[in-house]
Image: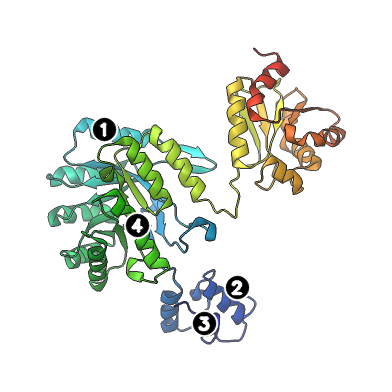
C-alpha cells in the first residue's frame, strides 16, 4: 500500500529547515509520497525510518543496473502499464545471441554486425547493447565468447543452468556488470549465492508462471534481489501472456515478487523465422520486454526496431526534438540556398530526406520552435517571423553562403512578408507545402538537373 504524505511528514523534524531542497517539511513529504523526491534527502529522518520508507515508496518494479562505465544501463523501474498513463521509464535493450556450439563463421558474422550497426538518431546512439552467450557443451569456448563480448564493449549475458559454466562466467560478468541467466526453483539457493558473491544480476526461469513465481521467492529467500525474469519460450502465446501477467501483478496487484524487469528470447520463440522474430521483437518492445534477445541484429532488423523503441520510450509529454542549428546537405557551399523548418524530429527527418534526395547542395536551419510541428509551432507563437529572423542573424548562416535565398515552409506562407521586412538582404521564398515536392522545387530554383 502506498505511503501517504502525512505519514512521512510525521517522521520529519517539522522545522522547515529547507536542507532537503523544499520550502517545508510537508512539501517534501508530499513529493516523497508522489515518488518525485528521495526520502534520503532529509538528514533528520532516522536510518530505520529511511529504510522502511525507501522500501514502501520504491516503484513496484525495481530498477536494476547492468553494465559498467560507458555500457551502464537501467532496466525496470516502470510505474504504469500503458505509455499514455504517464511514460515508460527504461527502454528495452536488444541482444544478439551466440553459443559455444555455433560455427566460427556464424559467430564472426554476428560480432561484425554488432560492430557495424551503430548510428545516431536524434541524439541517441543506436546499437545492440547486450550479447546473449548460451552454454551448450564447451566451458572454455563459452568463456572465450564472454570475453569477446567484453572486448567489443557490450554487456554479456551468460545463459546456463550448469554450475561449472556459471562459476566460470561469474568473474567476467562481475567485471562487466553482466547478467547470469541461471536460476530456477531447484538451484535457486546456489545460484543466488553465486550471484551475491560476485554482485551480478541473476536471471530466473520457470517451467510455468507459477513455477517462476516460486523460483523468484526462493532466490529472494536466499538473500538476492538483483533479478531479471525469463518470460519463457514454450510458445509465443504463453511468453506474451507471462510478460503481461508479470507486469500487471507487480503494478496492479502489488506483488513485489514479480517486481523485476524481464528478458524475452524471441530468437527461440521465432524458431528460425526472421520475419516472425522482428514481429515478436516489435511486440515485446510494446509489451513488456526489458532485454529482447534476437538471433542477430543487422541493419535490416535494427532500423525499424530501434526507431520503434525510441518512439515508444520517449516521454509523450515531451516532443522528440533535434538540435537547433545549421545542417548541411549534399556538400553545401557558398552558393547554396537556405531552407528553414522546425525542431520537431519527424519534420526534420522528412525534410532532410527529401533534401538529400534532391542532390542539390543546401543548408537547413532549425531554430528553437518548442519541438512542435510547423503549424503547431506557428499557432503556439514558437515559429514566427521574429524567431526565424533572429536565428538567421545569430546562427552565422550568412557567413556560410553568399546566396541570400531563404526558403520558408509552404504551410506558413503567411510569414513571408514579415520575415522579408526583418531580413531585407535576403530573398524570402515560399517553399512547397509537402516535403515530396522539395526535390523538384530545389532543382528548378537552382537550375541543377
Distance CA(mark 2)–CA(mark 4): 39 Å
Marks 1, 3: nearer the viewer: 3
As displayed, is residue 168 above or below residue 187? above
Residue matched to label 2? 21
Q: Residue at x 63, y 80 (%)?
A: 24
Dot 3: what SS?
helix
Q: Tell which circle, 2 or 4, labels the residue nearer the N-terminal end.
A: 2
Marks 3, 2: nearer the viewer: 3
Quarter of the image that includes the C terminus: top right
Q: Residue at x 46, y 74 (%)?
A: 57
Residue matched to label 4? 243
The percent coordinates of residue 121 (x first, y second) are 51, 39
Marks 4, 1: nearer the viewer: 4
Marks 1, 2: nearer the viewer: 1
The percent coordinates of residue 443 (x first, y second) are 67, 17
- Labelled pair 2, 4 in contact (Cβ < 8 Å): no
Q: Is residue 86 left or right of residue 405?
A: left
56 or 22, which is in the foreground?
56
* Labelled disc at residue 108: 1
Distance CA(mark 4)–CA(mark 3): 34 Å
Residue matched to label 3? 8
Q: Is residue 104 left or right of residue 349?
A: left
Amino acid at each position: 500500500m502506498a505511503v501517504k504524505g502525512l505519514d512521512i511528514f510525521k517522521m520529519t523534524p517539522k522545522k522547515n529547515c529547507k536542507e532537503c531542497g523544499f520550502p517545508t517539511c510537508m512539501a517534501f513529504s508530499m513529493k516523497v509520497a508522489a515518488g518525485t523526491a528521495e526520502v534520503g534527502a532529509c538528514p533528520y529522518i532516522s536510518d530505520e525510518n529511511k529504510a522502511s520508507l525507501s522500501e514502501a515508496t520504491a516503484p513496484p518494479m525495481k530498477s536494476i543496473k547492468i553494465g559498467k562505465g560507458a555500457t551502464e544501463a537501467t532496466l525496470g523501474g516502470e510505474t504504469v502499464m500503458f505509455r499514455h498513463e504517464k511514460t515508460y521509464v527504461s527502454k528495452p535493450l536488444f541482444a544478439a545471441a551466440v553459443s559455444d556450439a555455433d560455427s566460427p563463421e556464424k559467430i564472426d558474422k554476428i560480432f561484425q554486425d554488432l560492430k557495424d550497426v551503430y548510428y545516431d538518431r536524434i541524439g541517441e546512439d543506436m546499437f545492440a547493447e547486450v550479447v546473449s552467450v548460451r552454454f551448450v557443451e564447451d566451458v572454455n569456448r563459452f568463456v572465450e565468447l564472454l570475453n569477446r563480448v567484453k572486448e567489443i564493449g557490450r554487456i554479456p549475458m551468460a545463459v546456463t543452468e550448469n554450475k561449472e559454466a556459471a562459476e566460470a562466467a561469474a568473474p567476467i560478468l562481475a567485471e562487466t556488470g553482466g547478467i547470469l541467466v541461471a536460476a530456477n526453483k531447484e538451484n535457486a539457493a546456489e545460484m543466488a549465492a553465486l550471484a551475491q558473491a560476485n554482485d551480478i544480476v541473476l536471471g530466473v526461469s520457470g517451467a510455468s508462471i507459477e513455477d517462476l513465481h516460486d523460483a523468484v521467492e526462493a532466490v529472494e529467500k536466499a538473500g538476492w534481489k538483483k533479478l531479471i525474469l525469463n518470460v519463457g519460450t514454450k510458445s509465443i502465446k504463453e511468453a506474451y501472456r507471462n510478460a503481461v501477467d508479470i507486469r500487471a501483478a507487480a503494478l496492479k496487484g502489488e506483488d513485489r515478487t514479480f517486481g523485476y524487469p524481464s528478458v524475452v528470447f524471441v530468437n527461440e520463440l521465432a524458431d528460425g523465422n526472421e520475419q516472425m522474430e522482428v514481429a515478436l521483437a516489435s511486440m515485446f518492445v510494446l509489451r513488456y520486454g526489458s532485454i529482447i534477445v534476437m538471433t542477430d541484429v543487422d541493419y535490416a532488423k535494427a532500423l525499424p526496431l530501434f526507431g520503434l523503441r525510441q518512439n515508444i520510450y520517449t516521454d509523450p509529454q515531451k516532443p522528440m526534438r533535434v538540435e537547433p542549428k545549421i545542417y548541411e546537405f549534399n556538400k553545401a557551399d557558398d552558393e547554396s540556398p537556405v531552407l528553414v523548418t522546425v525542431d520537431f524530429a519527424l519534420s526534420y527527418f522528412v525534410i532532410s530526406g527529401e533534401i538529400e534526395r534532391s542532390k542539390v547542395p543546401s543548408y537547413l536551419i532549425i531554430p528553437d520552435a518548442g519541438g512542435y510541428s510547423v503549424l503547431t509551432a506557428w499557432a503556439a507563437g514558437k515559429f514566427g517571423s521574429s524567431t526565424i529572423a533572429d536565428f538567421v542573424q545569430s546562427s552565422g548562416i550568412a557567413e556560410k553562403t553568399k546566396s541570400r535565398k531563404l526558403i520558408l515552409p509552404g504551410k506558413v506562407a503567411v510569414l513571408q512578408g514579415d520575415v522579408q521586412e526583418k531580413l531585407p538582404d535576403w530573398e524570402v521564398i515560399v517553399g512547397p507545402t509537402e516535403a515530396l515536392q522539395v526535390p523538384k522545387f530545389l532543382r528548378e530554383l537552382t537550375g541543377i538537373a
